[in-house]
Amino acid sequence: MKEKKWLTNKGFFEIGGKILHDVMKDLNSAEVGLHETKLTGSGNVLIDTTKKFEPGNDIKFLSVPQTILNTIKRISKLNHKIDFPIVIDLDDLEEFETLEDVRAAIVYCIDLSSTMKYSIGKIGTSRIEAAKKALWGLYALNKKFFPNDSISIVGFGSMASLIDPYDIPFLKTFDANDNFLHYTNYQAAFRLAKKILQKSSAQNKRIVMITDGQPSACFIDNIHQKNEIISDKPYSNFYTPDKNVIFKIKKERDMELNINEESMVYLCYRYKKVDPKINDRTVMEAKKCKREGIDIDTIVVSDEEELLKYAQDLEKKLKGKTYHINQENMDEVLVHDYLTNTRKVLSSQHIW
């Protein structure tokens, strides 16, 4: 991994900052501001937007420049001469908005399956590039606005691995040469994310999936589960990665696969459909996370209705949120909904 050494801590966040700058620019041009968030109010993390001062609030959050500007504007409208010292009215007072500093633990899970190589939208950007941009932007947002959050990154195909955030720009999809790792196993992502979050004492825990929509693999934990599948489909495919594959992934990608030696993976790819057994075990694993107080949200990087619908149906069962990325307006959707934390579904049928 020597080729990655050039990306220093400063460089990583400078580039992340540029992504964030583009996000802010797009929001401003669309007249959608970060101040329109349900999280703002009487908090203790200062942000750079302001609002009218409310009597009783702490005056330490007063924005002196904006307050003086309001006073000058008011006097000018009355066609009065501006004399110093100026007299400030209560209505002139402006205060910085704040965010509640609620410590949270978040695991972002990015899909590295082979279908993520497909293009999305009119621009022709691949799903994986859109997903990496989304992940990088979200990571930068978390660090900027919620620095006390615990943030982890998980990459998954048919198996999952903990990812160093600094590897986000270098992530690649798995392919057929990776010994069946190129399938999509939501269950693998949920299990590893849950394992990470169980070690956290944070009150708020969340998994955010970034995927193109449908699982094509799940774990088989015992012979009974295997026989149940074989009884319905005698020619089913089961897979356990061998030591050579594990070594190859570690060497080429610096990824430690999260492997339970007693489990195998059931593989079944169906075009725009999900195998019922895979769906059942995916939902079961997600509900285990919910029982542990872990919320699950999904960001879909695909413009195919069937893929988006699967994610929406899953989130309905989990009472979570689904965000659909339209490549041309991706930044706006991510930032606005991430900060407002609104419970709404954005589908590809919306006008952006």
Image (cartoon, rainbow, N blue to C red):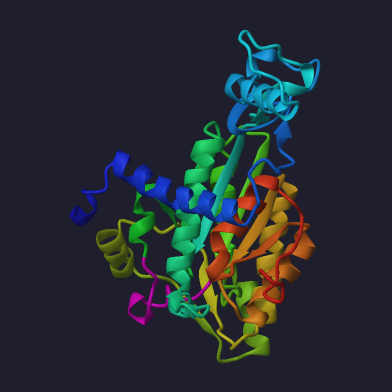
- The residue drawn where x is 59% and y is 57% is 332
* For residue 137, above or below residue 275: above
Residue at horizontal 37 percent and vertical 62 percent from the top? 171
Looking at the image, residue 16 sits to the left or right of residue 54; the answer is left
Picture coordinates of residue 190 (x, y %)? 59, 57
Question: In the rendered image, which quarter is residue 210 located in?
Answer: bottom right
Q: Where the C terminus falls, by quadrant?
A: bottom right
**Overall secondary structure of the magenta stretch?**
loop
Q: Does 285 sit above or below residue 241?
A: above
Identify the residue at horizontal 70%, vertical 35% (top origin).
Answer: 40
Tell me residue 164's x, y (percent): 38, 49
Q: Nearer the viewer, residue 124 or 80?
A: 80
Residue 179 in the magenta stretch? The answer is yes
Q: Position of residue 274 (x, y in %)?
A: 65, 81
Q: Is residue 175 magenta?
A: yes
| Start-end of magenta stretch | 172-185
Q: Residue at x 63, y 20 (%)?
A: 68
Front residue of this view, candidates 89 and 304: 89
Residue in the foreground of this view, choosing between 30 and 312: 30
Q: Is residue 25 left or right of residue 292?
A: left
Residue 13 visible in rendering: yes
Question: Is residue 274 visible from the viewing direction of this image?
Answer: no
